[in-house]
Image (cartoon, coloured by chain):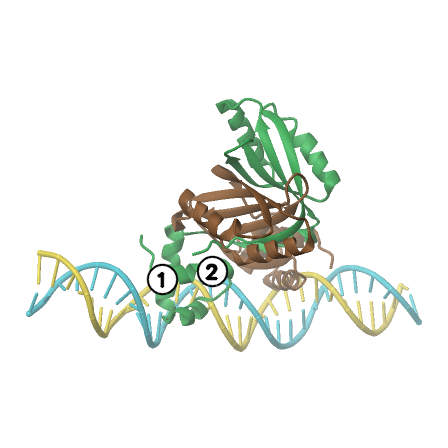
Chain colours: A green, B brown, C yellow, D cyan
Amino acid sequence: MALDTTDLSILNKLQANAQLTTKEIAAAVNLSVTPVHDRIRKLERAGYIERYVALLNRKKLGKSLVVYCNVTLDKQRKESFEEFNAAVSRLPEVLECSVVSGSFDYLLKVIANDVEAYNAFYQQNLSVLQSVLHISSFFVMSEVKSTTEIPI
Amino acid sequence: MALDTTDLSILNKLQANAQLTTKEIAAAVNLSVTPVHDRIRKLERAGYIERYVALLNRKKLGKSLVVYCNVTLDKQRKESFEEFNAAVSRLPEVLECSVVSGSFDYLLKVIANDVEAYNAFYQQNLSVLQSVLHISSFFVMSEVKSTTEIPI
DNA sequence: TCTGAAAACAAAAAAATTTTCTGCCGATGG
DNA sequence: CCATCGGCAGAAAATTTTTTTGTTTTCAGA
């Protein structure tokens, strides 16, 4: 499926504000509601739009702390990766987890209420994993930017 | 503003799927549409819900590469931070940027089409900044988990 | 305990939006 | 030449959102 500039414009608007009505988008792209509606459905079905979500205010919900962790596995073997991946997927405190190139294996983004809660999480959920050799935690002191918008 | 379990349940549903109708949410929390509608408005006004967005498929839009960068500033002075913060805020390729504790100053999440595009971005936008002393890039080889959902 | 005010809720109506249906128009290919 | 297909507009139908109205519940204070 090929996207034209109208499709890209629609995607861009929706990733900035998913509550725009098709009418509003239609006006912005100089079309009637029908083709806009059709295009959005197509973009959804084709997988360009993965989901619609509400973004919540972390701090208001008590999650004041963000921590990035560098994790090194004990052995870089299939079983270790599998154990670690499975564990991380189960942990709601882990918002992001990636396998990275370089001097360590994983980079995690974790949120917690405070340092104490993070330490408890760390002790109980990460350091107990057989596959883990070493973890370094970097505490976020200030969030300069945070967006889900992909430049298109 | 204090949240009860119904509010938390509504937030949790909306951050998983913002397209749920108030009717559907109402059924799930055993209320009629009116109180659910009122609660959502209150949660929006009080700032618990920051915005509604569509999450797009990065790869389908050509952004196959994710890179995390550790940035160390030349001088940890106010002017350096200000220059760097302002620059990063302008760059759409930078999805996340945080000031972190530890051995470097900033952690960035950047997306690009490929390694070549990343290198161009790096050369033209990051390494030109006076405030930057050192940058290490970690390329994401596999994304194990990526969510915007805050555990509540 | 009673009263009054405020908050939370339900039901229904009104307004707006989403979704479907029908048909038009231009481009394409047999 | 004409049939077909994709993209679009307009309108109707279905659904949802939003407002209105009124009831119930809660709770502080008399």
Residue B47 in the image: x percent, y percent?
Answer: 66, 60
The residue mark sitting in front, 2 or 1, is 1
Q: Residues within 10 Å of mark 1 (few under 14, many from 20)?
A: few
Residue A54: quadrant of the picture: bottom right
Q: Is residue B26 visible?
A: yes
- Residue annotated with mark 2: A14
Residue B11 in the image: x percent, y percent?
Answer: 62, 53
Earlier residue among tags 2 and 1: 1
* Chain of residue at mark 1: A
Residue C1 in the image: x percent, y percent?
Answer: 89, 63
Apparent side of residue B9 relative to residue B140 in the rendered image (left or right): right
Q: For this rendering, which residue is in front, B143 or A145?
A: A145
Apparent side of residue A21 relative to residue B49 in the rendered image (left or right): left
Residue B1 in the image: x percent, y percent?
Answer: 73, 59
Q: Is residue B58 visible?
A: no
Residue contact at pointers 2 and 1, CB within 8 angstroms = no
Q: Give the Cα distance between marks 2 and 1.
A: 14 Å
Q: Residue at x 69, y 30 (%)?
A: A123
Q: For this rendering, which residue is in front, B133 or B3?
A: B133
Q: For this rendering, which residue is in front, B76 or A42?
A: B76
Same chain for mark 2 and mark 1? The answer is: yes
- Residue annotated with mark 1: A5
Secondary structure, mark 2, is helix
Q: Residues within 10 Å of mark 2 (few under 14, many from 20)?
A: many
Name the amino acid, label 2: Leu
Name the amino acid, label 1: Thr
Is B4 above or below relative to C19?
Answer: above
Q: Residue at x 56, y 56 (%)?
A: B87
